[in-house]
Image (cartoon, rainbow, N blue to C red):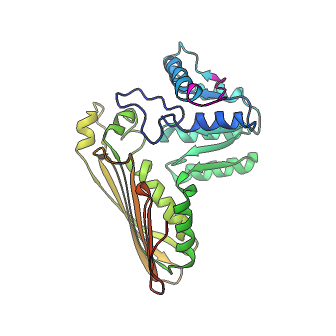
Amino acid sequence: EYTTGCVFTAAGAAPDKPAGVVAITFTDLRRRGKIGKMVLVDAAGDRMPTVRDTMAQKIGVAYKDMDLTMTTLPPDDVQFDPQSFREAIKLMDKGDVVTIFTPDDTHFEIALACIEAGLHVLCAKPVVKKLEDHVKLAAAAKKHGVLCAIEYHKRFDPIYTDARDRIRHQLGPFSFFQSTMTQPKAQLDTFRGWAGKSSDISYYLNSHHMDIHAWSVGRTARPERVVAMAARGAAEARLAPTDGRVIEDTITLMVHWRNSDGSAGTATYTSSWIAPKADCHTQQYFHYMGQKGEIRADQGHRGYTMSTDDGGFSQLN
C-alpha cells in the first residue's frame, strides 16, 4: 500500500495514499533527473504482475512523463521468498538509496544487509523494536559510512514543525501531552498478515506523536516511567486469527517525564484501528501544555491554536 498503492482487499488503498507513496515519489524524482534505475522487491513474486499493473494505472496513466521502468523481484513465478531483498541488493551500487516499507519485525535484517552493502537507508517507523538492534544499526551505519534514517513524515508537516518551535521557545517547561491517532476498521484487512504478529497499533500509529513530543522537548526533558494498557475485542472479531495471536484494538501509553529543572510532566499517547469510517481516514490530534501556555493541533482538520499566560488565545492557521 505505502509503496505502490496496491492492496489486495475489498476496500483497496487508503484514501490518503491511493497511489502509494514511495513508487510515485521515486518516479517523480526520476522525471526530475534526480535518480536513474529502480528496483522493487517484495517477498511474493506471484503478485508482482498485479503490482505492476496497479502502478501503470495509478501512476503511469494518471501522471505525465512518469517512467515506471524497473526491475521487480522475486520472479513472477516465485510464491514466497523472504530473502529476495538480497538479490535486489546485488543490483545496487554503493551509495545508492534504499527505502524499507515492510513488516516491523523484518526491518533489522533488511536494513543491516543494505548498510553492510554500502547503501543509504530510509526505513519506515519503527526502524526496529528493540534498543539493542537500534544501537547495532547505528554502529553499522557509522562503520560503513552511510546514512540510516527513520521515516517520521509528521516532522515535515508545517503545523507540527511550527508547534515544535513554539513548544521549545514560548511555552515553558513541559507539563502535559495528550495525543490520539485512529484509523477505520477496514484498514485492519490490509494489515491482516502482521497485525498482532510482527507489530501492533502502538508501533504503527502512537510512534508518530511520541516522536513529535520527544522531538519537541527532548533537549530539556526525558521519560522516566512508562505504563501501557490495551483494549481488545473488535480487531480479533474482525480478523479471527487462528494462530492464537493477540490483536489489540486500542493501546494507550502513560509516561512520566522529568524536566531538566527538576519539575515533572505527564503524557498519554493513544492509538486505535477500530474506528468507524469518518470524514478523514486518520483522525489525529494532540494537546501540549507547558507551564506558560498550551497548543492544540487537529491535523486531520488543520485546526491549530495556542494560548499563553502573556498573550492569551490565538488561531495560528
Q: Is residue 144 above or below residue 310?
A: above
Question: Which of 164 and 224 lies nearest the eye of the viewer?
Answer: 164
**Residue 117 shown in magenta:** no
Image height of 161 relative to 172, above or below = above
**Relative image position of residue 196 (x, y in whole percent):** 36, 41
Tell me the residue at 50%/51% (across/down).
Answer: 130
Camera-side residue: 173 or 294?
294
At 41% from the left and 64% from the top, the residue drawn is 286
**Is residue 116 toward the left or the right of residue 109 in the image?**
right
Is 152 left or right of 148, judged from the image as shown?
Answer: left
Number of numbered markers: 0
Dividing the picture into quarters, in which one does residue 95 lie?
top right
Is residue 85 toward the left or the right of residue 2 in the image?
right
- Of all residues shown, which one is farthest toward the bottom? 310
Q: Residue furthest top?
A: 77
- The residue nearer to you, when weighing 8 against 83, is 8
Magenta segment: 61-71
User: Residue at the spot x=44%, y=57% of the render?
Assistant: 299
